[in-house]
Amino acid sequence: MSALEVNKILASIIIAILVVVIISHLGDILIDVDNDNLTETAYKIEIEENQEILGATLNNDINIEPISSLLLSASSAKGQKIYKKCGSCHNYEKNGMDKVGPSLWNIINRPKADIAGYNYSKALAEFGGVWNYEELAAFLYKPKDFMEGTKMNFAGLKKVQDRADLVLFLREQSDNPAELP
């Protein structure tokens, strides 16, 4: 490579750097970046506040159909089929081992986050209360909307009849099933 070619390459690099610097300064002149006159450059979106409960957030805006009236006509057999979506992460057998999720044996009217040795999310561990029919159905509708911070990665069951069938099936997984509402 001759000295002339090296000079051409170096000159090209220097010109490219100069063009970038000039364009940058020209942009700063055209648009005053130091002018901070507190103008809003975005649209405000009103977000309703969520209710804070013992460190977990419960979204009050979840408006789902109650399942209590459907439990009498719900199908445990259909609930067992729906449970297949849950079975990869949960076990429902008595004295069954926890999987990715805790065992669902005797879940109706059981205190939340009560299985010793299972590592619950902080949100669920601090949530408190027991799993009643309606609260379990609301959780199954869309867990992340019901309780922010839950580790449960499940899209949810949108159909109210599916939730009623599944909750009825889970109710029966107990030595002494809870009374129907």
Image (spheres, rainbow, N blue to C red):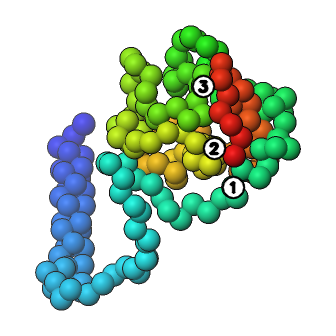
Quadrant for the N terminus in the image: top left
Measured in 3D between alpha carbons, the distance from the residue under mark 1 to the one under mark 3, in whole angstroms, is 21 Å
Residue 106 tag number:
3
Label 2 element class:
helix
Identify the residue position indicated by label 1 in the image. Answer: 66
Q: Is residue 48 left or right of residue 173?
A: left
Q: Position of residue 135 (x, y in %)?
A: 57, 47
Measured in 3D between alpha carbons, the distance from the residue under mark 1 to the one under mark 2, in whole angstroms, is 9 Å
- Position of residue 135 relative to residue 174, above or below, is below
Label 3 element class:
loop
Q: Position of residue 35 (x, y in %)?
A: 15, 85
Q: Which of the marked residues, 1 or 3, is nearer the chain's N terminus? A: 1
Q: Which of the marked residues, 3 or 2, is nearer the chain's N terminus? A: 3
Contact check, label 3 and label 2, Cβ < 8 Å: no
Q: Residue at x 58, y 12 (%)?
A: 96
Q: Name the residue type under label 3.
A: Asn
Q: Which of the marked residues, 1 or 2, is nearer the chain's N terminus? A: 1
Q: Position of residue 55 (x, y in %)?
A: 31, 48
Label 1 element class:
loop
Q: Position of residue 27 (x, y in %)?
A: 24, 79
Residue 155 in view in this figure: no
Q: Nearer the viewer, residue 171 or 156?
A: 171
Q: Name the residue type under label 2.
A: Tyr
Q: Residue furthest left?
A: 34
Q: Residue at x 56, y 35 (%)?
A: 109
Identify the residue position indicated by label 2 in the image. Answer: 133
